[in-house]
Amino acid sequence: MVIYIDPLLTVLKNEIMDPYVFSTSSLIDSPNPSSDLKINNLVFMDDSTLISSSKAGMEFMLSITEEFYQINNTFANHNKYVLITNSLLLTSNSTLPPITFNLDLSSLNSVSSITITPISMTTSFRFLGVWFNIKSSRDFVKKQLKRECYSFAAIIRPAKLSPKQVVYLHNAILIPKLEYRMQVTHLSESDCHLITRSIRSVVKHKANFFRSLPNPILFLSQALGLINLFAHQRQCHITNLFLMANSSSVFIQSLFIYRLNLIQYNFLIRISPLLIKDWSIWSSLFSFKKDYIACTIALLTSTPFHLLHTQLSELLNLSLTDGRIPLFECMTPKAFKAYFPILRKRQLFYLSQLVTPQGTHLISWKAYYDNLVGQRGPGCIPYWYKDIQQVTTVPDSQNHLLDHFNITPTNDSSFYELAPCLSSPPTTRNWIVSLDDYGSPIFGKQLLVQASRGTCSIVHWISPDCESSPGDLIRLSPCPGCAAHTPLPPSKKRNADLTLCTPTVSLQHSLILPTTNERIRQDGVRLYYSRLDFDSDSPSADTAIASNTPVTIESSAAAVFANFPLVVSSDSRYTFFTDGSLINLGTPDVSIGWSWMQIVPDAGFPNSIATYAHGLIRDNPSSSRAEAAAIYAVLTISPRDSDVTIYTDSQTAIDGLRSCSCSVYSNSRLYYKTTNFELWAIIERTILSKNLTVFPVKVKAHSGNYLNQCWHLAVWPGLAIWPLGRGQMPIQP
């Protein structure tokens, strides 16, 4: 926001006694008995320019200006103020509303507000003798130059002047005026040719030349020596560039270096702009056309002159040394021009920024996006990446670079050696990587460290894309079952787990993987669903038998929700009783049953039991797994953003729920030592994804509690056949 004040409209506020003496009645009384103050001259304020980034800042400066006028006994006509602002989204035909500035009143300022109408975005204004407009348009300067030439030609044509006199007047009078008006404007050769057309016509007329005479003859020094406007413009701009580059002023030198750095960043140039020999890639960009320094440097390449860093006075070397192969050499010109604002926003200058550390493959878009924002990349690959991929890689080769785009790896401080496992205390459980007998990497988290043997047991995780896409972000998922599958052996605190792969690796040949977050997310437990077989049977009015078709725990819970919709609560509060039981342990008929009941008191339901469900789990039998499965089934059918109260007689389930609800379970050091840890990780993810608030309540088992007995009746039949229909639940007398 800029306001200009015209000095010609500034007048003395009080009556002038004579040209050198004026009344001082408005000034503070002084001991001097004379009421007149004699000065040796009169000083009028020149053009005042106020620049601010906000309306409040402009109001503050205008308040100071009014106080200054009061002290100096002057007055400015506010109607002649000129306001320029780029804070409004305006078009060339927009009607601009006036803006009112509210000033601070004081003993020196009695003006409460000033209202000014801003000029249009396309209207040019004069600043320090140069004309500008907010849209960086050159049209106004072109019109000024054309008007000057037409006016000159109109005066010269009827005058009785010789051709040499006309050329002299043109070179000595008109050219300096045109130079002044275009001192920060670059015009093309065609623009200059069009502007000076009337001048060439007058010169040919005075010299009795045919109109078809080639124009270059007029510019020859051996002929008339008429100054070529385009050549003169180029000479002036290049001279200014040399003066800035070799200035003795430290400020000008610093400013020039800053502008070169800015050009380097704006146009993704890997070296100093002074060393660019071909600007054709950037010359059609609008941002290039409005950059005076960049246009002047590009203009310099059309001359035999050039600037060298060694010849500049203490000019720093601006070459960027941390990259290889600029991107404009790896893309089609059309794609580079169209997408370079996006490349600049992502600070992508070189192909080496998109290449694996080995320098042989282009990083996949998914890995680049994951590294950039820390989340899964979008499904749509951008066109600029496809263009780089098409130009630099071998087709159908998993992003293998062409030979001339291969980049020799360099020592980068961002890469570091992994620490050996032997350097870590035996009590610390780390994510590690080792090699199998075939030289392939093995990932996992330490489960048990045998320091005396130099080995450790790990929970095996896999990364399918690790070897095919070197340098990409490593994503791990639980081992679904491999040739060297080693199940988790039983211990005093837990049963054997056939689903877990827990191989033993050497500590001496293993390295610690640096991790920033060890929370198990959805991708890490998705495969576990397919390994947890879960049978569900739905109670009905008739006798129902448990289904023999195994389904996943996720689809089972969805089926339960579909067949038994909850009684919707108006306050999003739900109460459940859950239980799980284990029978025939150690026999082929071992089975786990789970059950839940929804309790809605004072709603007309028999014994307040609104609905219920039960089911079977056939793999990895344990009583704690049954309790956890019942809780997961309840959480799956609970609506989002609900308060869920769960009554259970299992203290293990209570402790697990409390850990999950506070989001610390899968970050715990004892995570892998917990029984059924993967199932509890699923429960934790469900609580977080559905934004549930869970209140676990402990109920003493076999204490005579009626509901406790009811859900035991629901669980035990769930192990074989449910004998009662919905209307046949036992009723409390």
Image (cartoon, grey):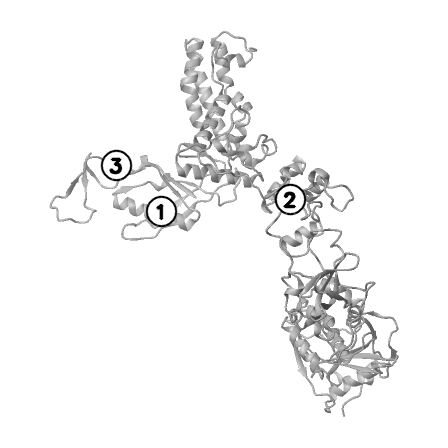
- The kind of residue on which mark 1 rests is Leu
- 467 over 656 or under it: above or below: above
Marks 2 and 1, how far apart in space? 53 Å
Residue located beneath label 1 in the image: 62
Q: In the image, residue 171 lies at what x, y percent?
A: 43, 17
- The kind of residue on which mark 2 rests is Ser
Residue located beneath label 3 in the image: 43
Numbered disc in front, either 2 or 3: 2
Marks 2 and 3, how far apart in space? 63 Å
Residue located beneath label 2 in the image: 352
Q: How many marks?
A: 3
**Earlier sequence position, callout 2 versus callout 1:** 1
> Which residue corresponds to the image point at 74% horizontal and 72% vertical from the top-left?
679
Q: Is residue 459 left or right of residue 207?
A: right
Cβ–Cβ under 8 Å for marks 1 and 3: no
**Earlier sequence position, callout 1 versus callout 3:** 3
